[in-house]
Image (cartoon, coloured by chain):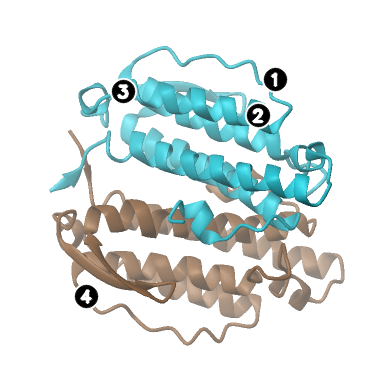
Chain colours: A cyan, B brown
Amino acid sequence: MTISMYEASVPVFSTRLKALSKVLAIAEKNAADRKIDPQVFIGARLAPDMFALARQVQIATDHAKGAPSRLAGREVPKYEDSETTFADLQARIEKTLAHLATFSAKDIDGSDGKSVSLKLGGQEMTLTGLRYLLDVAMPNFYFHVTTAYDILRHNGVPIGKGDYLGTR
Amino acid sequence: MTISMYEASVPVFSTRLKALSKVLAIAEKNAADRKIDPQVFIGARLAPDMFALARQVQIATDHAKGAPSRLAGREVPKYEDSETTFADLQARIEKTLAHLATFSAKDIDGSDGKSVSLKLGGQEMTLTGLRYLLDVAMPNFYFHVTTAYDILRHNGVPIGKGDYLGTR
């Protein structure tokens, strides 16, 4: 037996984004508790030339909305990338979860051999659905979800691995 | 068509670990260039109660050696967790890559419905091979590989997303 392309994509994105939403909620509450301007967290970054928290969440959701859309041969929804508050970021995650919920197994399954074209890092690339999911979408998605967590953890937000995993 | 359990596990771990090995090599060279004691990087962490770089690499390789072993029904190799230098960490990654190379598709395929038992965070759990791979092994593996990268990036090591992805 094997894994369906649907199982390896849509529920993975949804599970991780729900956990990220809770992590962001803890961060927002923690900012209030510590009387820290929430913008400090929203704009926090791990290095001067790395993306800040808001952008990490934007890119994570970009991969989560882009991958199933491309695998299903649908248009990728365009987001404005104008989020500047925790409420904005939560709304973006909600919107992405709603988009993910529009896909059923039959939309995605069978897309492993499908040809997928996308622009990434300014480069146009064409690859199979399988390679796109495993080599582009997943590693990028996990990178930005983890880095969002790492930024908040670095700033003293009381989160742990269980919050990232969504198991608590 | 679908993804084989082998394709979704062994080559993913190998590709990411090879990229992590290069990231660590850049970090080691960067320490020498900047006349920084390599131990500063080895012991660097993003928060006082987060694991340092060496431990991040250890846990990433734990998941990479553990997942295929458990899915194939083989004993998980025990590592001493005694790495204290970049050379030690590289050797651990090499050892893990060599272990990964011992698996072929027939060892792993068909393990999605197999019952897998493991102890994680002090808790004994039993779940299917599919859920173990997608909900435990992959998110944990990606978490520690990304956090190792984030620690080094935070410390000014000249690495970029392409190094994490292994595309440069």
Task: Pick out the residue farthest to the right.
Answer: B35
Sequence-wise, which precedes: disc 2 or disc 3?
2
Closer to viewer: mark 2 or mark 3 = 2
Q: Chain of mark 3?
A: A
What amino acid is labelled 3 in the image?
Phe
Closer to viewer: mark 2 or mark 4 = 2
Q: How many circles with numbers are drawn on the protein? A: 4
What amino acid is labelled 2 in the image?
Ala
* Quarter of the picture holding the N terminus of chain B: top left
Sequence-wise, which precedes: disc 1 or disc 2?
1
**Helix, strand or loop under label 1:** loop
- Residue A82, label in figure: 1
| Along the line of sight, the residue nearer the viewer: B139 or A32 | A32
Residues marked 2 and 4, same chain: no
**Helix, strand or loop under label 3:** loop
The correct choice, above or below, for B129 with respect to B76 in the image is: above
Q: Circle 3 sits on which residue?
A: A103
**Helix, strand or loop under label 2:** helix
In the shown orientation, is residue A142 left or right of residue A49? left
As measured in the structure, the alpha-carbon distance from the residue carrying label 1 to the one carrying label 3 is 26 Å
Q: Circle 4 sits on which residue?
A: B74
Residue B81 x, y percent position in the rendering: 51, 83
